[in-house]
Image (tube, grey):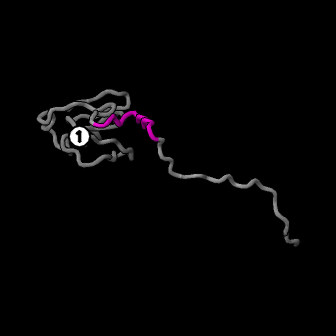
Amino acid sequence: METITGKRPYRKRAPVESVHVEPEAGKQPEIDVGQGQTGEPGFGAQAHDAAEGQGIDWLELMAEVHAEKRAVVRCWHPEAKHDLAQLKNGANIEVKVGKAAYQLTTGEIVSL
């Protein structure tokens, strides 16, 4: 067999200036929907009274969420210690601090 010694034609790679792009001075950062501004609750966050919703503990809330036939996307609990919870079907749901409740993919919020 012959050995190929010639160069193959190809296009040279374009140089990359920087992987991390810093925002320009004086420009406002883009607002990420769902995160809220500093000091404001994000989209879907609920104002809650600390005394409300404390009648149910974390395990009871998770039992309710697991028993729900429809798809759940997030839940609230006054003493939430984690950001995510895994359901029996393998889906992860968002966990937030608030009155005990959960939200379905339809947007319906079920309070407990």
Which residue occupies 85% across, 66% down? 6
Inspect the magenta stretch and tell me whether residue 28 lies in it: yes
Q: Judge left or right: residue 50 versus residue 71.
A: left
Q: Quadrant of residue 62?
A: top left
Residue 96: % across, % down: 27, 40
**Is residue 67 at least partly visible in the picture?**
no
x then y, percent, for residue 47 = 22, 30
Say what secondary structure mark 1 lies in: strand
Q: Is residue 94 magenta?
A: no
Whether residue 22 can be seen here: yes
Q: Quadrant of residue 32?
A: top left
Magenta part of the chain: 25-38
Q: Residue at x 32, y 31 (%)?
A: 44
Q: Is residue 51 above or below residue 91?
A: above
Q: Residues within 10 Å of mark 1 (few under 14, many from 20)?
A: some
Query: Tag 1: residue type?
Result: Val
Q: Which residue is mark 1?
A: 97
Depth check, front residue: 33 or 98:
33
Q: Quadrant of the N terminus?
A: bottom right
- Going by the image, does 5 lie left or right of 44? right
Residue 99 percent coordinates (x, y): 20, 35
Looking at the image, how many numbered discs can be counted on the residues? 1
User: Residue 50 occupies which quadrant of the picture?
Assistant: top left
Main SS of residues in magenta = loop
Can you name the residue that lies furthest to the right here?
2
Q: Residue at x 23, y 48 (%)?
A: 81
